[in-house]
Image (cartoon, helix red, strand yellow):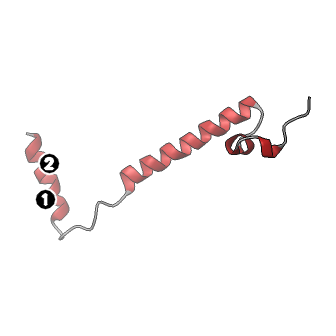
Amino acid sequence: MPKASQQDRPLLARWLPRHPLLRELTIVMILKVLALALLWWAFFSEPGPASGPGAVAERFTESESRGR
C-alpha cells in the first residue's frame, strides 16, 4: 500500500507534526498564544483619549458612588 503524499493530506494535517504528542503540544501552544493575545487586548487596549486632566478621577468617583 503506497504512502499518501504531502499533497494528498489536508492543509492543516500537512502543517501539524505527525507525532501525536508534538501535534497536541503545538495545538496547546497556539491556543495559549491566542488566549494571551486576547487578554493583552482586553486589558491593555486603550479605551480612548481622556477628555481632560480630571477625567480619570471623575470616572473613578462615578464608579465608587454607583457601588455604594
- Residue sticking out furthest to the bottom: 52
**Amino acid beneath label 1:** Glu
**Amino acid beneath label 2:** Ser
Q: Nearer the viewer, residue 5 or 50?
A: 5
Say which mark, if any, is on residue 31.
none
For label 1, count other residues whose C-alpha is less than 10 Å away and answer few (under 14), some (14-19) or many (20+).
few
- Residue sticking out furthest to the right: 1
What residue sits 71% from the left and 40% below the top? 13
Q: Going by the image, does 42 lie left or right of 25?
A: left
Q: Which residue is the site of mark 2? A: 63
Q: Going by the image, does 49 lie left or right of 27?
A: left
x, y percentage for residue 22?
Answer: 73, 35
x, y percentage for residue 2?
Answer: 91, 33
**Against 68, is 40 above or below?**
below
Q: Looking at the image, how many numbered discs can be counted on the residues?
A: 2
What residue sits 69% from the left and 45% below the top? 11
x, y percentage for residue 12?
Answer: 67, 43
Q: Nearer the viewer, residue 3 or 66?
A: 3
Does dot 2 land on a helix, a strand or a loop?
A: helix
Q: Going by the image, does 41 lie left or right of 9?
A: left
Quadrant of the image containing the C terminus: top left
Quadrant of the image containing the N terminus: top right
Q: Which residue is the site of mark 1? A: 58
Find out whether the residues at labels 1 and 2 contact each other: C-beta distance under 8 Å. no
What residue sits 12% from the left and 53% below the top? 61
Q: Nearer the viewer, residue 34 or 61?
A: 34
Query: N-terminal of the two: label 1 or label 2?
Result: 1
- What separation in Å lies between label 1 and label 2 (alpha carbons)? 9 Å
What residue sits 15% from the left and 66% below the top? 54
For label 2, count other residues whose C-alpha is less than 10 Å away and answer few (under 14), some (14-19) or many (20+).
few
Does dot 1 land on a helix, a strand or a loop?
A: helix
